[in-house]
Image: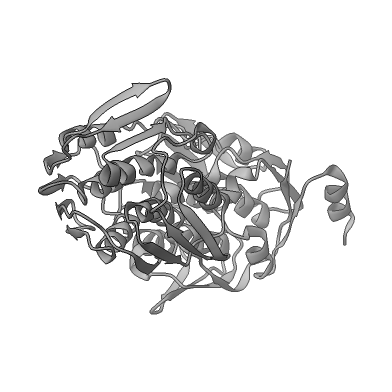
Amino acid sequence: MEQYVIRGGNPLVGEVEIGGAKNAALAILTAATMTDETVLIENLPDVSDINVLLEAIAEIGATVDRIDRHTVRINAATIGDLSVDYEYIKKIRASYYLLGALLGKYKRAEVPLPGGCNIGSRPIDQHLKGFRALGAEVSIRHGAIVASAADLHGSHIFLDMVSVGATINIMMAASMARGNTTIENAAKEPHVVDVANFLNSMGANIKGAGTDVIRIKGVDTLHGTSYAVVPDMIEAGTYMFAAAATKGDVLIKNVIPKHLEATTAKLEEIGCDVEEFDDSIRVSASKRLGRTHVKTQPYPGYPTDMQPQIAVTLALANGTSIVTESIFENRFKYADELARMGACIKVEGNTAIIDGVEKFTGAEVSAPDLRAGAALVIAGLAAEGVTVVDDIVYILRGYEDFDGKLRGLGAEIERVNNAKDIQKFRLRA
């Protein structure tokens, strides 16, 4: 079992380059199966979620050519199997995007119910509601969602709740449905916009992505394209909070500052210096930070995927902060782990009350999910002494070369897989 071992206490200083957005890339890769022509996708993050999805796409018959670490060429003309293997789905939730893509192109798809991070209930009822509105028959049989449509047609769909996954899935299917579709109460996240831009570059007709009303005119066929994935705002935000928690000074490059406004606002509120440039952001903190209250919201509100990172930072701040989680109900599982390092966090329902402490001390902790795992690494970087983070398989799902990029900022962190290596690290001066 791989682990990170960290010696904390060094402020992070320097520059770090942000990769492509995992959440956008997962949907874009599935959308690439909607044409028989060749698609080239650049700025892919090299993380396990992406690699598993590429395997799943190859498994159903597409030709997948990994040109380099961040570039892939896909030709889906050879897809022959519209049933996706459970082995892939249980590893990554985003495999369900193959439902919308395959239903749109082939008018049929069979995808097992999804897996992924255990951060709470993420029902797919809005996806299924959307497919049914487009004329598909949808049922759950033998643990799989089976969707088929003799005639996939446009419809007016009002989502009962803002759902990124449902918005993207319906958008993909509707782009090749007959007639016009309107999605109301649509998610506005940057990766929704990125997927719409990608589909449009293939010949789709999608307008309004980034607003709460998306209008789609169905087309008969999509064509090949070349496309670069948008930068990852969650990876960027994670390094922003790592700089803040360690009282560092970091320039985060290859970002879209507009996407980070909610994160930037909170960092400034607690006392960080934040400078924005065209495609980079500099975050520095020279003194102990202050308290704040934060509530997660759909974009452009404060992102749920940045909630554990701000909580770790506030656990070292002066005063009492309140963090309210309004998206997922199991997102505070890291609180017990952080308490082992000396944090004072009390969780009541969907709210965490955090009394800031002067310092953390190193401990052995386990990553309960992807973003909480990254937050525990930040805690280890800020702590006195050595911290060991277990279950880093979650972190590897969404952060490319996390330990390498942190070492480039002066962190003492290593990826190890046995007790002997941990002991060596501990003994090192």
Residue at the image point whose x is 40% and y is 27% from the top: 144
Horizontal relation, residue 7 to residue 358: left or right: right
Horizontal relation, residue 56 to residue 35: left or right: right
Where the C terminus falls, by quadrant?
bottom right
Nearer-the-camera pick, 28 or 247: 28
Location of residue 217 by image quarter:
bottom left
Horizontal relation, residue 17 to residue 112: left or right: right
Q: Give x and y (percent) for residue 332.
A: 50, 36
Horizontal relation, residue 197 to residue 267: left or right: left
Q: Give x and y (percent) for residue 193.
A: 28, 59
Nearer-the-camera pick, 226 or 396: 226
Q: Is residue 35 visible?
A: yes
Residue at the image point whose x is 29% and y is 43% from the top: 106
Q: Give x and y (percent) for residue 169.
A: 29, 44
Colouring rule applied to residues: one colour
- Which residue is farthest top? 142
Where the N terminus falls, by quadrant?
top right
Residue at the image point whose x is 43% and y is 23% from the top: 143
Q: Give x and y (percent) for residue 135.
A: 16, 34
Q: Is residue 314 visible?
A: no
Nearer-the-camera pick, 159 or 281: 159
Location of residue 266 by image quarter:
bottom left
